[in-house]
Image: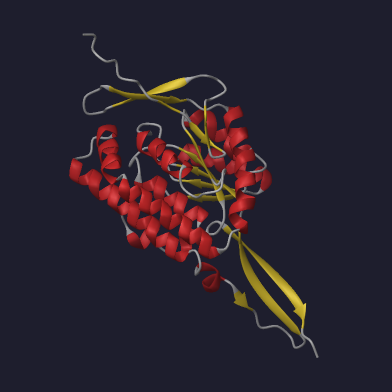
């Protein structure tokens, strides 16, 4: 009897809520660093794929930012529920994608789920903490109201394979932003599986877009794109950071860097400041009635 041939999985890009093949038809191969064995093939995104993801992210931003804070919190919580149900799968994928021990992988995945819960609870609270009524001359009201920045490009580090992705995505979208995630180049598998969870959750299409490939190829186009409003750079390459800042200056993008970041630290990752990095303040004057 002929032995069954397993069906190899080709991981695609998440753009606009759909799994898209890269227009370039190129791919890369993920290897198990412990054994050198092949794990999977995954898409190598191109400049055209990036442009498509920006269009999708703009549409996703309009839908996501118009939802109530309560709805956003419920959807984020739903994401945590779905990750909890597939926890063992993620632990295994982090394990085969990195040199970490099984206990370390479990710690990373559990911390990731808990972090989503934290930001889900912040969705309907951050505006009250940042917004203010300002003291002005008699006869006027003056309000400072926080609003989401827009589309944020998230460039993940090549260190941990899962926790940074969850931490930055949650921090960015809590206030109503959409995002384009450039995945870990060395061990993208956990983030690719995360994209499958996102696509089958309640997020509007385009809120979270995930691209894989060579960072050196994608990042310059992301940083230079005029419809991207902010860049969240989580890697430690100083030269790349400088180049991104130069490109961001063309349309005055917000730029934030997390060099030498402790991803397990609750003090560094679970606070209002992480949300505040990707908002704008709108101040409104209004006359007071007689």
* x then y, percent, for residue 56: 61, 40
Quadrant placement of the C terminus: bottom right
Query: Quadrant of residue 78 in the image?
Result: bottom left
Query: Quadrant of residue 100 in the image?
Result: top left
- Asked whether, in this view, residue 91 is left or right of residue 8, the answer is left
* x then y, percent, for residue 214: 47, 28
As drawn, the residue found furthest toward the right would be: 290
Q: Residue at x 51, y 49 (%)?
A: 203
Marker count (numbered):
0
As drawn, the residue found furthest toward the top would be: 1
Q: Residue at x 58, y 39 (%)?
A: 223
Is residue 260 visible to the viewer in this orientation of the structure?
no
Q: Nearer the viewer, residue 85 or 21?
A: 85
Whether 9 is drawn above or below 197: the answer is above
The colouring scheme, among rainbow, by chain, secondary structure or one colour, is secondary structure
- Asked whether, in this view, residue 85 is left or right of residue 171, the answer is left
């Amino acid at each position: 009897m002929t032995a069954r041939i397993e069906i190899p999985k080709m991981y695609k890009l998440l753009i606009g809520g759909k799994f898209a093949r890269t227009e370039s038809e190129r791919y890369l191969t993920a290897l198990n660093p412990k054994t050198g064995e092949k794990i999977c093939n995954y898409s190598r995104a191109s400049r055209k794929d990036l442009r498509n993801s920006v269009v999708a992210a703009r549409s996703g931003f309009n839908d996501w930012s118009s939802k109530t804070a309560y709805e956003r919190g419920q959807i984020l919580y739903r994401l945590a529920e779905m990750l909890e149900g597939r926890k063992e799968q993620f632990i295994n994928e982090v394990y085969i994608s990195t040199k970490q021990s099984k206990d370390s992988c479990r710690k990373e995945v559990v911390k990731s789920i808990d972090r989503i819960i934290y930001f889900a609870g912040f969705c309907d609270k951050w505006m009250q903490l940042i917004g203010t009524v300002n003291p002005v001359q008699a006869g006027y009201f003056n309000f400072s109201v926080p609003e989401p920045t827009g589309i944020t490009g998230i460039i993940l580090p090549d260190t941990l394979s899962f926790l940074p992705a969850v931490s930055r995505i949650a921090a960015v979208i809590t206030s109503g932003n959409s995002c384009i995630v450039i995945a870990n180049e060395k061990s993208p598998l956990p983030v690719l599986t995360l994209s499958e969870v996102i696509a089958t959750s309640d997020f509007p299409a385009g809120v979270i877009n995930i691209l894989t490939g060579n960072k050196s190829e994608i990042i310059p186009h992301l940083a230079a794109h005029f419809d991207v409003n902010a860049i969240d750079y989580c890697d430690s390459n100083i030269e790349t950071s400088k180049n991104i800042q130069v490109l961001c200056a063309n349309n005055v993008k917000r730029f934030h860097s997390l060099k030498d970041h402790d991803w397990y630290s609750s003090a560094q990752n679970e606070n209002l400041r992480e949300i505040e990095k990707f908002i704008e303040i709108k101040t409104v004057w209004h006359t007071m009635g007689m």
